[in-house]
Image (cartoon, helix red, strand yellow):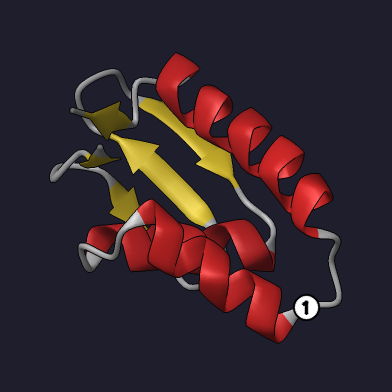
Amino acid sequence: MYLRKNIATSENGFIFNPSTGDSFSANPVAAAILEQLKQGMTFSDIKAGLLDSYEVDPLRLERDWDEFINQLREANLLAD
């Protein structure tokens, strides 16, 4: 699974889907995750980096990660 190629993102968290015309805003952590997805990083590598960078319980990260990925799917920002 990866971020669709046509999705535009910015460093300040602006996300634009030109296929639908929808736009979203993301917090700094979400914007960094989106950038890493655009670079082709795997989910497991991104999550490992988050665990290294932030004091977060691994179980909490998994719950938050699943919720975030579901939001991206619902917004039609991810492709298989």
State the image coordinates of residue 67 (x, y, percent, origin top left). 66, 30
Secondary structure under tag 1 reads: loop
Q: In terms of depth relative to the viewer, which is nearer, 65 or 4?
A: 65
Tag 1 residue: 54
Residue occupying the far left of the picture = 5
Left or right? Give the position of 22 relative to 28.
Answer: left
Left or right? Give the position of 24 relative to 7.
Answer: right
Query: What residue is shown at x 23% (from left), y 68% (from top)?
Result: 39
Residue 10 visible: no
Image quadrant where one finds the C terminus: top left
Q: In this view, does 76 lie above or below 17?
A: above
Q: In terms of depth relative to the viewer, which is nearer, 69 or 56?
A: 56
Q: Is residue 11 above or below residue 61?
A: below
Q: Give the amino acid at mark 1.
A: Tyr
Residue occupying the far bottom of the picture = 53
State the image coordinates of residue 13 (x, y, percent, origin top left). 55, 60
Query: What residue is shown at x 66% (from left), y 68% (from top)?
Result: 28
State the image coordinates of residue 61 (x, y, percent, origin top left). 73, 52
State the image coordinates of residue 18 (x, y, percent, origin top left). 23, 32
Left or right? Give the position of 4 relative to 51.
Answer: left
Image quadrant where one finds the N terminus: top left
Q: Quadrant of residue 55?
A: bottom right
Residue 45 visible: yes
Query: What residue is shown at x 40% (from left), y 53% (from top)?
Result: 43
Q: In terms of depth relative to the viewer, which is nearer, 75 or 15?
A: 75
Q: How busy is the neighbourhood of tag 1: few (under 14 within 10 Å), some, or many (20 plus)?
A: few
Query: What residue is shown at x 15% (from left), y 42% (from top)?
Result: 6
Q: In terms of depth relative to the viewer, which is nearer, 56 or 27?
A: 56
How many numbered discs?
1
